[in-house]
Amino acid sequence: MVVSVLLPALGLILCAVVIPIVLERWVPESVGGMIVNGVLTAVLMTLLSTGYFLWAYQRQDTRLLDAIGFAPGETLGYFLRLGLSAGLIWGPVMILMISTSPRRWKENVW
């Protein structure tokens, strides 16, 4: 039980650390770049969390694809809400990583 909860949470935390650092390479070194990095990271993390929940539920019961085919809006909305709820785990870590990005700036000064 602990492993089934702890490993996905640690995976989300690791992704919330790595994704903003990777995206820093493509956004400008400015406050606007930090905001863009935050939005892109939040979208990617939400999609990643949603995908994980879809995979985990599908692994438990293969009839999930039938539910998606029968009511795609409601079913995918449910998993999107689960992915957003997982933001309680990865959100603070993401904010911390983005707020410390000026320390890694090479050209611009905070």
Image: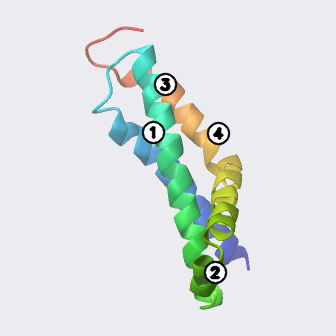
> Of the residues shown, which amino acid type is indicated by label 4?
Pro
Judging by the rendered image, the residue that carries numbered circle 1 is 40
Separation of marks 3 and 4 at Cα, in angstroms: 15 Å
Dot 1 or dot 3, earlier in sequence: 3
Which residue matches tag 2? 70
Residue type for callout 1: Leu
Q: Position of residue 25 (x, y in %)?
A: 28, 33
Residue named by callout 3 = 35
Q: Residue 92 got which mark?
A: 4
Q: Residue furthest top?
A: 109
Residue 53 locus on image (x, y percent): 61, 70
Q: Residue at x 38, y 38 (%)?
A: 21
- Residue 95 position, x and y percent, is 58, 33
Secondary structure, mark 4, is helix
Q: Answer above or below: position of 75 versus 26.
A: below
Disc 3, SS? helix
